[in-house]
Image: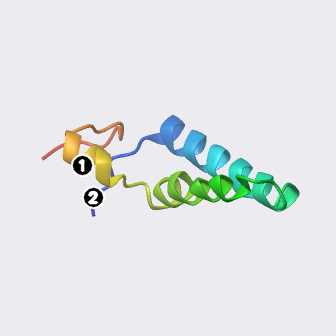
Amino acid sequence: MSKNIGGLDRIARIVIGAALIIGYFMNSEGAYSWLYLLGIVPLATGLLSSCPLYSILGINTCPMKKD
């Protein structure tokens, strides 16, 4: 997988993903608390610096040179 997520996008994904996962542990008895676990997706893509959806759509926010 090639890197296609830039710095600001990466930081936002990590922060949002971590906040959602923390929200799950703080409110695990709620009716729809399992939705907080969707934070795993932005957290994983932020940590890996690669988003499969960006690859499909041809989006690249990474400032690296393209060959």
Say which residue appears at 56% left-offset and 45% top-offset: 13
Tag count: 2
Q: Which numbered tag is attached to residue 2?
A: 2
Q: Which numbered tag is attached to residue 63?
A: none
* Contact (Cβ within 8 Å) of mark 1 with mark 2: yes
Mark 2 lies on a secondary structure that is loop
Above or below for 6 versus 28: above
Which residue type carries mark 2?
Answer: Ser
Position of 53 with respect to 10 (left or right) is: left
Above or below for 10 versus 49: above
Q: Position of residue 9 (x, y in %)?
A: 49, 38
For this orientation, the residue located farthest to the left is 67
Q: Position of residue 67 (x, y in %)?
A: 12, 47
Q: Position of residue 22 (x, y in %)?
A: 78, 56
Position of 61 with respect to 55 (left or right) is: right
Q: Quadrant of residue 66?
A: top left
Q: Quadrant of the N terminus?
A: bottom left
Which residue type carries mark 1?
Answer: Ser
Eye-nearest disc, 1 or 2: 1
Position of 57 with respect to 36 (left or right) is: left
According to the image, label 1 marks what residue? 55
Say which residue appears at 21% left-offset and 40% top-offset: 57
